[in-house]
Image (cartoon, rainbow, N blue to C red):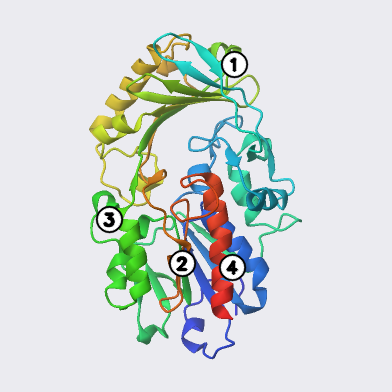
């Protein structure tokens, strides 16, 4: 075996119950990174490689951190600036990532859009607020993939800007899962498939990328009752989409935002803006994220943001004409909020840019633990849409689901 390289021929020659297992994980958000970590640590003697296929530029998913080489001080957590940890399992997992996390100490408030009243937003007793090292949420996902020395855990391999568009599993491929790209070229083979995030399994795939969801299409040839039941549950789930507009300010332009002394602002009583995140970054700079209401995002479906991975790598159906209109509209909505500074797009050091989180906040019944692993099909599911002891849709639920999926695969192999 050649370590770190994708060698097609080796998949054809391996056989036997004790042959090293290859595992493909679709998605390197918190769930996928957590699954990779726990597999690497729990069954190292059984593994050939763990390949993480991620459409984005790096790990983290909704909890990624956006940066720019041209602006060293710029960073923005435009999906999840922190995680609320509510369970002992979640606390233990965070504690195991020494150096990759830190307590979130931002000033959290609620703003009444009509009266301008601001009230402190207290979190419940026993809940810990956590962010990544240096305030970068992506550091949590990075920490999951690395050992105490900072080296990538063996046998994890990351394949960023890699989008899986097709899935098959046939006897001709030694019973392995075959992953293909948009051109139908094979980009991976694996004995087990871990679906981190419901994208390839949910009907909304068809609206965004066209065609049938890859795992749904593959399942039609497998005749696996448990997999069919899992896909049926996932298909019934909906989501609360969010449009975000984010930008980076420096110098005098950043001053009024920093002077607010606020970081996490939940807005009530406004039809377009649901939340603001104000994140100090660099020397005297700050990033600002506007989060739309879900109703506003639903009214403006079909717009993803030209710089998003869904549009840039996946070729998602999107209306470029409406992107600028929505950015202007949300900036105008910001001016309606009491006490908030006025933003001139011309003075932004970065942005304003639009991004759509269409699949990131699941609603409905979570996928039951009993259906999260399908041993006959050799498929496991993890993500914030899977049942855990944490709140559905939370960063913590994604983390725990990854750990649970790894444990279930380990048990199935026994």
Which quadrant: the N terminus?
A: bottom right
In this view, the residue in front, 255 or 366, is 366
Residue drawn where x is 43% and y is 52% of the image: 385
Which of the two labelled residues, at mark 1 and mark 3, occupies the earlier sequence position?
A: 3
> Does the CB distance between marks 3 and 2 fall below 8 Å?
no
Residue position for label 3: 203
Which of the two labelled residues, at mark 4 and mark 1, occupies the earlier sequence position?
A: 1
Which of the two labelled residues, at mark 3 and mark 2, occupies the earlier sequence position?
A: 3
Image check: 299 left or right of 381? left
| Residue 138: percent from left, percent from top | 58, 44
Residue position for label 2: 370
| Residue 333: percent from left, percent from top | 35, 17
Badge 2 crowding class, 10 Å Cα cut-off, few under 14, some 14 to 19, many 20 or more, is few
| Residue 179: percent from left, percent from top | 39, 69
Label 1, secondary structure: give it. Answer: helix
Q: Nearer the viewer, mark 2 or mark 1?
A: 2
Which of the two labelled residues, at mark 2 and mark 1, occupies the earlier sequence position?
A: 1
Residue position for label 1: 258
């Amino acid at each position: 075996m050649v370590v770190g390289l994708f060698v097609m021929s080796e998949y054809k020659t391996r056989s036997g119950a004790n042959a090293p297992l290859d595992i493909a994980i679709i998605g390197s958000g918190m769930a996928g990174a957590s699954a990779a970590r726990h597999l690497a640590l729990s069954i190292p003697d059984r593994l050939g490689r763990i390949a993480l296929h991620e459409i984005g530029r790096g790990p983290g998913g909704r909890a990624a951190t956006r940066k720019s080489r041209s602006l060293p001080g710029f960073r923005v957590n435009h999906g999840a600036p922190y995680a609320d940890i509510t369970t002992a399992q979640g606390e233990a997992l965070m504690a195991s990532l020494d150096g990759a996390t830190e307590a979130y100490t931002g000033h959290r408030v609620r703003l009444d859009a009509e009266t301008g009243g601001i009230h402190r937003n207290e979190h419940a007793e026993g809940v810990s607020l956590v962010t990544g090292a240096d305030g970068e949420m992506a550091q949590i996902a990075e920490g999951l993939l690395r050992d105490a020395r900072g080296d990538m855990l063996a046998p994890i391999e990351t394949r960023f800007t890699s989008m899986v568009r097709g899935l098959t599993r046939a006897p001709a491929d030694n019973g392995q899962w075959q992953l293909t790209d948009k051109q139908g070229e094979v980009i991976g083979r694996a004995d087990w498939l871990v679906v981190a995030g419901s994208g390839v399994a949910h009907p909304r795939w068809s609206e965004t990328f066209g065609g049938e969801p890859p795992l749904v299409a593959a399942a039609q040839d497998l005749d696996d009752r448990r997999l069919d039941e899992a896909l049926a549950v996932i298909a019934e789930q909906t989501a609360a989409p969010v449009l975000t507009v984010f930008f980076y300010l420096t110098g005098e332009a950043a001053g009024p935002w920093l002077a607010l002394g606020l970081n996490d602002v939940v807005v009530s009583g406004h039809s377009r803006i649901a939340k603001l995140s104000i994140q100090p970054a660099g020397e005297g700079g700050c990033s600002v994220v506007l989060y739309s209401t879900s109703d506003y995002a639903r009214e403006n479906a079909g717009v993803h943001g030209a710089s998003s991975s869904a549009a840039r790598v996946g070729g998602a159906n999107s209306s470029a004409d409406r992107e600028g209109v929505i950015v202007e509209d949300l900036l105008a909505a910001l001016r309606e909020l009491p006490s908030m500074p006025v933003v001139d797009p011309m003075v932004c050091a970065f942005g304003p840019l639009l991004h759509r989180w269409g699949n990131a906040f699941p609603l409905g019944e979570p996928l039951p633990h009993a259906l999260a692993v399908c041993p006959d099909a050799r498929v496991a599911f993890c993500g914030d849409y899977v049942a855990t002891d944490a709140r559905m849709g939370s960063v913590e639920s994604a983390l725990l689901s990854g750990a649970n999926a790894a444990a279930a695969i380990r048990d199935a192999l026994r």
